[in-house]
Amino acid sequence: MTPTLVRQHLPRAGRAPRVDPCARARDWSEIQERMLVPLYEAVYERLEVGPGSRLLGLGCGSGLALLMAASRGAAVTGVDASAPERLALARQRLLPANGGAGARSGTRLVDALGDAREPGSSAFTVVTAFESIGCLAGDAEGLAGLLAAATPLAGRGAPVVLAGWGPPERCATTSVLRVATKLADPLRNAGSWRPALRDDLEEVAQRAGLRIDGSGRVACPFGYADVDSAVRGLLSTGLFDAAVTATDQVQVDKELAEALHPYQRRDGTVWMPNVFRYLIARVP
């Protein structure tokens, strides 16, 4: 990569990156979200999610984690106030039009936490917040408050799951994400990428008043059909938005593609081993 590229552009503070939110949501749903399937499976297996489980998914996005829990027999409720385009895709996955054969019994999707629990229904037995934190400066802001607001909807002792990136030295994608830091450097804003810290998850849980009860690490390799798919998938995470704001989309695409070359195989596919971490806390 050319290290002086970013210096050739003046920062345009206050301008949001020009993205198509619907296309971004589709890229997340079709390309990127599946990379976290091993994380979802490990958590559900450890917590024995299945028939009798009532799961509340915070920041449920396009609903793959909910779909997996529902497939295990759990009744699931998803809430996502920040990504309406992803939530719309979740509705297509879990709540087909006209309640067809593919509709999932016991499934609810709402855009406000206050609507998550129906009057007269029993408490949630599991709460998940799979939106990975510890990667953007300030990305955990507000999460402790959201968890504190959600835990009264769960029973005493119910597990609350947080997720985040593992140690940078265990994540090949770290070197690619550093592109976001370099390009966003002129703005120095809260959306810039930073390496995950060891106690990111614990700090959020403690601020939410939860009791920490264990943790785990899961291999979540990122695999893509080609470099173009990898660029689209990584951009769909939002981790490069600050870089696009500071420079432009063309430059970010170019440098991101260059950073991916060391991970491209002879057949054109891209493969990056990563480790993600999850924390289990309990409602006091």
Image (cartoon, helix red, strand yellow):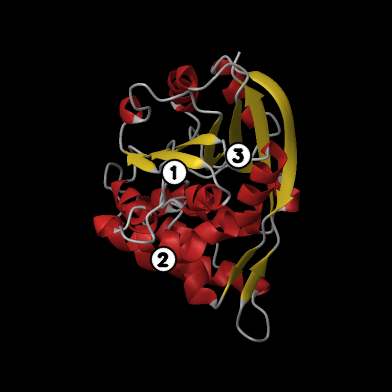
| x, y percent for residue 142 | 43, 26
Residue 103 in view of the camera: yes
Q: What is the CA distance from the residue labelled 3 to the residue labelled 1?
A: 13 Å
* Total numbered labels placed on residues in the image: 3
For residue 21, what is the image quadrant? bottom left
| x, y percent for residue 145 | 45, 20
Q: Which residue is found at the position 45% from the left and 49% from the top?
A: 184
**Which quadrant holds the N terminus?**
bottom right
170 on left or right of 58: right
For residue 89, what is the image quadrant? bottom left
Q: Which residue is found at the position 31% from the left and 58% from the top?
A: 96
To which residue does mark 2 refer? 251
Q: What is the CA distance from the residue labelled 2 to the residue labelled 1?
A: 31 Å
Q: Earlier in the sequence, mark 2 or mark 3?
A: 3
Q: Are marks 2 and 1 in contact (CB under 8 Å)?
A: no
To which residue does mark 3 refer? 163
Category of crowding for the residue at label 2, using alpha-carbon neighbours closer than 10 angstroms: few (below 14), some (14–19), many (at least 20): some
